Image (tube, rainbow, N blue to C red):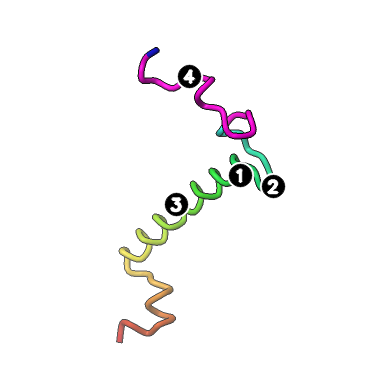
Amino acid sequence: MGPYPTDATEKAYNGSDRNAVKFGFTPQSELWQGRLAMIGFVAYLLWDLKGYSVLRDLLQLNQ
């Protein structure tokens, strides 16, 4: 056995594929929600660095 993951180690708690798209409160949906949240957070940070900040406009921090 090498350091690489195998099918036996890549199973989630419910015995399904970790990257399967499943609805409801499953480990797979929690992984996808986390991934999409990270993408959204990075997208907002990049958008904010570009000069368009909804948060600064709402809090009126750029006056």
Quadrant where the N terminus is found in the figure: top left
User: Callout 3: helix, strand or loop?
Assistant: helix
User: Callout 4: helix, strand or loop?
Assistant: loop
> Mark number for residue 24?
2
> Nearer the viewer's eye, disc 4 or disc 1?
4
Judge whether residue 16 is colored magenta.
yes
Disc on the earlier residue, 3 or 1: 1
Judge whether residue 5 is colored magenta.
yes
Q: Are marks 4 and 1 in contact (CB under 8 Å)?
A: no
Please state which of residues 56 and 24 is positioned toward the viewer in this rendering. 24
The disc labelled 2 sits on which kind of residue? Gly
The disc labelled 3 sits on which kind of residue? Met
Q: Are marks 3 and 2 in contact (CB under 8 Å)?
A: no
- Which residue carries the number 3 mark? 38
- Does 32 sit above or below residue 57? above
- Could you classify mark 1 by the number of other residues whose Cα lies within 10 Å: few (under 14), some (14-19), or many (20 or more)? some
> Nearer the viewer's eye, disc 3 or disc 4?
4
Real-space Cα separation, disc 3 to disc 4, in angstroms: 26 Å
Question: What span is in magenta?
Answer: 2-17
Percent x, y of residue 8:
53, 20
Percent x, y of residue 44:
41, 61
Real-space Cα separation, disc 1 to disc 2, in angstroms: 7 Å
Q: Left of 48 or right of it: where is 26? A: right
User: Callout 2: helix, strand or loop?
Assistant: loop
Disc on the earlier residue, 3 or 4: 4
Magenta span: predominant SS is loop
- Which residue carries the number 4 mark? 6
Disc on the earlier residue, 1 or 2: 2
